[in-house]
Each structure stands twice: as structure tokens, then as C-alpha cells.
Image (tube, grey):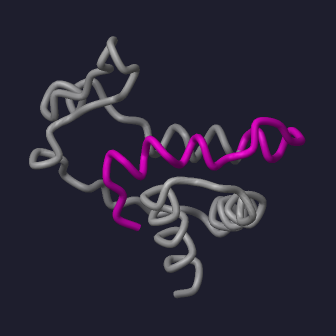
Amino acid sequence: MELTIKDRLYIPAILPKEGNFSQFNTKKDILRKIEISDKERQDTGLTENKENKRIEWDVEKDIPLNMEFSPQELEYLKQACERISDEQLPDDMWGTVQKIYNVIQE
């Protein structure tokens, strides 16, 4: 799965805030895989705008991360996406959800 910085910022918001121990470990593994490194932060100028509390970066310098998820991680991501399916979310967040579903369907 090819993930942009925006996808990697949205995925933690998609994941459940609580679960059992197995789910906790799966979530921790996913978060570790999609973590934005200090080098990436520096290379893209990723910062928080203090005035409007928005995260900003140079999208032209965003190099997508190619990520492989285990079947267990993909199932957890699928369940997380299904859990939020009736919520009102920004269109670009739905784009991340769709990207996850496309990989699961392959």
C-alpha cells in the first residue's frame, strides 16, 4: 500500500481508541510502520501551525511510503474503517479509507 503523509496522519484517527490486548498490539504495530520519521519531517517541512492548529508540509516533497501490512493488520484496518462508515468525515479522509479498502480487495 502506498501511503502519503496525509494518509499516515489520518490512519491513527481512523483506528479505535480502545480494544483488547491483541488489538492494542496490532494497532501499535500499524502505528510503528506508518510513523513519520524526523528526517521525513525535516525534508517535507512538516510542522504544526500554532495559529490555526493545523499540520502543514510541502506536498511536493511528500514521497509516498510503500507499506506491507500483515493479514491481521489489514483485518484490523478493515474493521476500523467499517466502524466509522456512518460518521461524517472530510472527503480526503474517506480517500484514505478507500485506499485501505482497495488493498484489502486485492
* x and y, in percent, of residue 62 in the image: 18, 47
Name the dominant secondary structure of the magenta segment: helix
Q: Determine which quarter of the picture holds residue 55.
A: top left
- Point out the image quarter for the N terminus: bottom left
Numbered range of the magenta stretch: 1-25
Residue 61 counted in the magenta span: no
Residue placed farthest to the bottom in the image?
Answer: 106
Q: Residue at x 49, y 46 (%)?
A: 10
Q: Nearer the viewer, residue 59 or 42?
A: 59
Q: Is residue 60 left or right of residue 65?
A: left
Q: Nearer the viewer, residue 86 or 81?
A: 86
Residue 2 counted in the magenta span: yes
Q: Looking at the image, is 13 positioned above or below residue 56?
A: below
Q: Is residue 52 left or right of residue 71?
A: left
Q: Residue at x 26, y 31 (%)?
A: 56
Residue placed farthest to the top in the image?
Answer: 50
Q: Looking at the image, is 103 positioned above or below residue 32?
A: below
* x and y, in percent, of residue 49 in the image: 29, 19
- How many discs appear? 0
* x and y, in percent, of residue 99 in the image: 46, 70
Q: Determine which quarter of the picture holds residue 82.
A: bottom right
